[in-house]
Image: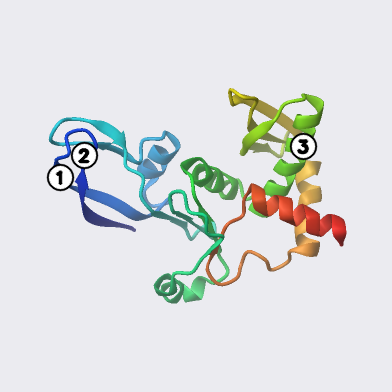
Amino acid sequence: MSEKVNKMIICPKCSKESETELICSMNGKSFPDMKKRIFEDKFFEWKCPKCGHESDLLHPLLYNDIENKFMVYYIPDTKRKVVVDEKLEKEFFELSYIKKRIVSGVNELKEKIAIFDFGADDMAVELAKYAVERIVEKSANMTVSSGYFLDMDRSENTISFQFFVGSENRPYIQTTRLEVYERSMGIVKKYFKGFGKQHGFIKIDREWAKEAWKIYKNS
């Protein structure tokens, strides 16, 4: 299913107001075309019906995939680490076993969907990514501004990440053995068992990985 709302949008170019239909909730399995638009960076595209101006109209989106047991709540630029939607919690009370995440950027939204689509654990992926990021910064002598999960190939025993490095934020792909993820999975099971399945949507990102790594090293 998908849910839509109508909003009055003021064009930043011509200042004219027009009614626009926004998709605020969607099921990725039921609407593969909309899911594809997310990965093609077309989902939030908007065109002013008055002057034709085109821009991205970023707005909250609840992406759910009950079959793969996850929900991702995209809230643009949010700094919150936990978001509790009581109405949603009641509606999906019987699905308390699913993972609920909050993200603040479109790239993070795509990354979470990709991670869960691969059947991977996002906490283990974040820890593995953080470990690989530190290796990249030391071995390549480059500052990493951000990084994202790219691919997991179990047949080749590899996991890949794309980092953005240097002052120009150049893309840098680093592939490593899957053991890095598996060791991270061991840390998650030992020190963070049950974490991430509590009430509400939580943010599992780079900052979480840094704190989790400290907890692990100090334990």
Q: Earlier in the sequence, mark 1 or mark 3?
A: 1
Residue 64 percent across, percent down from the top left: 45, 57
Residue 15 percent across, percent down from the top left: 17, 39
- In which quadrant of the rendered view does residue 154 lie? top right
How many C-alpha atoms fall within 10 Å of the one at disc 2: few (<14), some, or many (≥20)? many
Residue located at (43% from left, 77% from top)? 90
Residue corresponding to mark 3: 134
**Three-letter amino acid code of the residue under disc 2:** Cys
Residue 187 lies left or right of residue 99; in this view the side is right
Residue corresponding to mark 1: 17
The disc at residue 11 is 2
Q: Which of marks 1 and 3 is in front?
A: 1
The disc at residue 64 is none
Residue 28 percent across, percent down from the top left: 42, 50
Q: What element carries label 3?
A: helix
Q: What element carries label 2?
A: loop
Q: Identify the image quadrant of the C terminus.
A: bottom right
**Mark 2 and 1 residues: CB-CB less than 8 Å, in contact?**
yes
Residue located at (39% from left, 74% from top)? 87
Q: Is mark 1 on a helix, strand or loop?
A: strand
